[in-house]
Amino acid sequence: MGKLLSKNFKNKAEKLFQIYPEKFKDDFGANKSILSQELKLPYSKTIINLMAGYLCRFARVQSEKEEIVVQKFEQPQTPQEAA
């Protein structure tokens, strides 16, 4: 079986996320409406649904990465870790 989403497709979705990070969240319906109504991308309904789903997962992963980084900086070091 082949890949469901090509690398080119993922790159386009990630570039949209970098340009509009405040618009895309981990909500499929909101991402779908942003892609189809606000940005008016010239893609079919199937492609917009796939891109909205990928952006949903991508946004969730990015927010989890940010939480991990914040947790690492907020944890106080014990004397054993400092040595």
Image: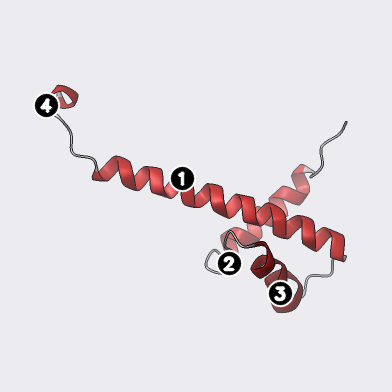
- Residue at image mark 2: 20
Q: Secondary structure at mark 2?
A: loop
Judge the density around disc 1: few (<14), some (14-19), many (≥20) Cα neighbours within 10 Å: few
CA–CA distance in space, label 1 to label 4: 27 Å
Q: Secondary structure at mark 4?
A: helix
Q: Residue at x 79, y 45 (%)?
A: 5
Lower sequence index among marks 1 and 2: 2
Horizontal side, residue 3 vs residue 27: left or right: right
- Residue at image mark 1: 65
- Residue at image mark 3: 39
- The answer to whether 24 is drawn above or below residue 66 in the figure is below
- The answer to whether 59 is drawn above or below residue 35 in the figure is above
Contact flag, marks 3 and 2 (Cβ < 8 Å): yes
- Outermost residue on the left side: it is 79
Contact flag, marks 1 and 3 (Cβ < 8 Å): no
Tag 1: residue type? Lys
Q: Residue at x 19, y 25 (%)?
A: 81
Lower sequence index among marks 1 and 4: 1
Q: Position of residue 13 (x, y in %)?
A: 69, 56
> Which quadrant of the view contains residue 29?
bottom right
Lower sequence index among marks 1 and 3: 3
